[in-house]
Image (cartoon, helix red, strand yellow):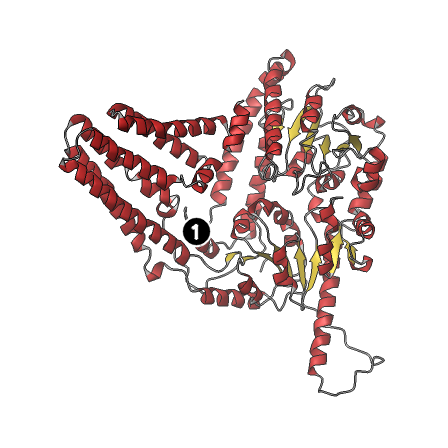
Amino acid sequence: MISTAIRLARVGSRSELAAAVLLGLGYPCVLLAALIPNLGFFAGAAAVTYAADRFLHMRGSYLVNRLQKVRAGLSIRFLVRQLLLILLVARLDLADRVIFYVMLGGFLVFYALQVCHGALATLIRLRRTMPVVTRNVDLSAIRIPDAPPGGLLRRSGEKILHLDLPAVAGLIVAAWTNDYVYGYVGVGLTIGLGVLYVGALTWYLRGRRRVPAASTVLTAVDGWLREYRPTVVLYFSGSKESAYQVNMWLETMEQIEGRPLILLRERGIAAQLAPTAVPVICVPGGTHLMNLDLSTVRVALYAANVGKNIHLLRVPTMKHVFIGHGDSDKLASVNPYSKAYDEVWTAGRAGRDRYALADVGVRDEDIVEVGRPQLAPIQLSSGAPKNPIPTVLYAPTWEGWDDNPGNTSLLLAGENIIKRLLAAERPVRVIYKPHPFTGIRDPKAKAVHGRIANLLSAATAARLTEPRWAEAAAAASAEQSAALAELARTETALAALDAPGRAGGDEAERSRVSLVDQGWLDEAKRLRDEWNDAYWRSFGYWEHRVVTGPEPKLYDCFNQSDAMVSDISSVVSDFIASGKPYAVTDSAELGVEEFKRQNTAVRAAVVLSNSAVELDELLTSVADPAADPLARARTELKRYLLGPDEPTSMEQFNAATRELAEKAQARNTGVEQRLAEPEGAAPPDDSAPTAEPEVNDLDSPVRG
């Protein structure tokens, strides 16, 4: 019942639901108290509405957005409360007193201050918005002033509205005591604080506080580009939830030969980008991007098929490559859009065969096998469980944009998988890491996710009532306490490390101070490794875990697991790199043979039906690796899907980059020669020797 109410109210927890109920009941109570009239009742109900509103905003509840859409936003709720206070005072027969007119005038002046405040805050943000957001790009050629203090602009709308508290409290006390001085003081405080707030914002409209004009910023960026001379670009566009798709390529870009550059199109993606030494330029405007000086770029890499790719695909002086953000048997891996690129790079032979079978117009000679450089952090199977009991990872993909039952196992099989793992004859630990997009389209998927989280939480609590696990918990108590302390220490250190500018600095200021050095990155990596180690030690090997958010990463979960259950997605192909047993759910009920025929990555998997009765086969392989019937098949499939171990994926990737850069330069040189020929000149003699095409230097270090 409660979970249904949470889903309908679009809130994220029981506490948010309670706050929503209090908010929904509070306003009718305020109205009733004003009509009776009853000062004590009014004061109590008004306090509840203030507190519930504040709680929902601090939690970032989606309910706040829904109220805004139905014209019941925060400013309206504050205005209604003030109007009801006016009604209360009138019902108390104070309408002919001076205090009543002071109250009316005070609220009108306060409303005018809110209008001025909103206009000033918006104007300041607009005047401090640069046409680009950068990282590791030297913009010292232009002056970017400090941003206003974070306290002025962060949640500024809420802050100005809450300045009515002195007036509301003062007027209620004045009506209660018949001492109107309280009301005068309260109204005066509200207006005075509002004037101070507006005055503080006005100070930051001065010319010296504005960022340079867009043309000045873009000229500086072009100047930096001419000096840096990038050769390889990673281009990405998408929603902020898709930031993981570009983050997975950062380490590869740091190791790539040449001078790499990352081009982003959305400010939200720039904010979600992980630390990197590679220069980053986020250019939201298509016109601005198309006018950037990218003349030295020879290879452009694309991690997603999106409409904004056209803004760079139009440039003929560079070769364009689709590298994707995973390797799987999903339809997205053979998107006909891929015809737009000069080449498509796949991990292994399977990707090439996949395009041939799909027959979507991608030519075989345009496909290059480069391995998967991102898989380097995945540890190979040791042949035995890491802990006294095995750990099984359940990592379902999301529901997709259509209602194909084969998209995710979560809807039809998710709870069955978890229940069978929890009821296994030989106990296992479950790590559940859902796709970041889970529930964004289908509320049923979000509901199942919630039920699975509850199942795992209840199962962990139940284990502690059993003597075996209670003894293990007691024995590990000191170590877990130390790990929690280490976790807190590293989180504090990482937070300090991730704040290069002043607290509250905006995009413009962060672009100014975004230059990093290798020492900073090495320290961040060291702290992140320490955090990851402490995280897994902070709870027992018998405790089930729900892992959401960017940390721990998926590959960290791979390394903690002895087996995995998943769906048709790149997660399966990546997990195959570990050599560990895995199962894939046939949610569309195609049947084992047809499912394996259609999906390459399933050939070495235990295939699960929606009932998940086949899970015993997977658990048996984990318990006795020597009797694992699919071990050899996994080894063969790994090479087919991900390519050979030698040369390394990074070496293959760099070789493909060099070869394509040479093709781009040869094309550009040929065009220049043809354009330089006088009109009507005879075509060149093909038998004559030609000079080797000049190739841009691809051997300079990543960090300039």
Question: Foreground residue, 121 or 174?
Answer: 174
Name the residue tied to disc 1: 506
Where does residue 28 sit, x and y in percent of width and height? 35, 28
Where does residue 229 sit, x and y in percent of width and height? 60, 66
Q: In which quarter of the image is residue 93?
A: top left
Residue at (63%, 25%) from the top-left corner?
544
Q: Quadrant of residue 46?
A: top left
Q: In this view, does 58 lie to the left or right of 399?
A: left
Question: Foreground residue, 210 or 259?
Answer: 210
Question: Foreground residue, 258 or 217?
Answer: 217
Residue at (32%, 41%) from the top-left corner?
161
SS at badge 1: loop
Q: Is residue 495 left or right of residue 176?
A: right
Question: Foreground residue, 664 or 538?
Answer: 664
Viewer can see residue 126? yes
Q: In this view, does 374 lie to the left or right of 628?
A: left
Q: How many residues crowd around disc 1 within 10 Å: few (fewer than 14), some, or many (20 or more)?
A: some
Where does residue 8 sit, x and y in percent of width and height? 52, 31
Viewer can see residue 389? no
Q: In which quarter of the image is residue 394?
A: top right
Residue at (55%, 44%) from the top-left corner?
524
The quarter of the rendered structure image containing the C terminus is: bottom right
Where does residue 572 sit, x and y in percent of width and height? 73, 39
Q: Is residue 615 left or right of residue 438?
A: right
The three-letter code of the residue at mark 1 reads: Asp
Residue at (79%, 78%) from the top-left corner?
690
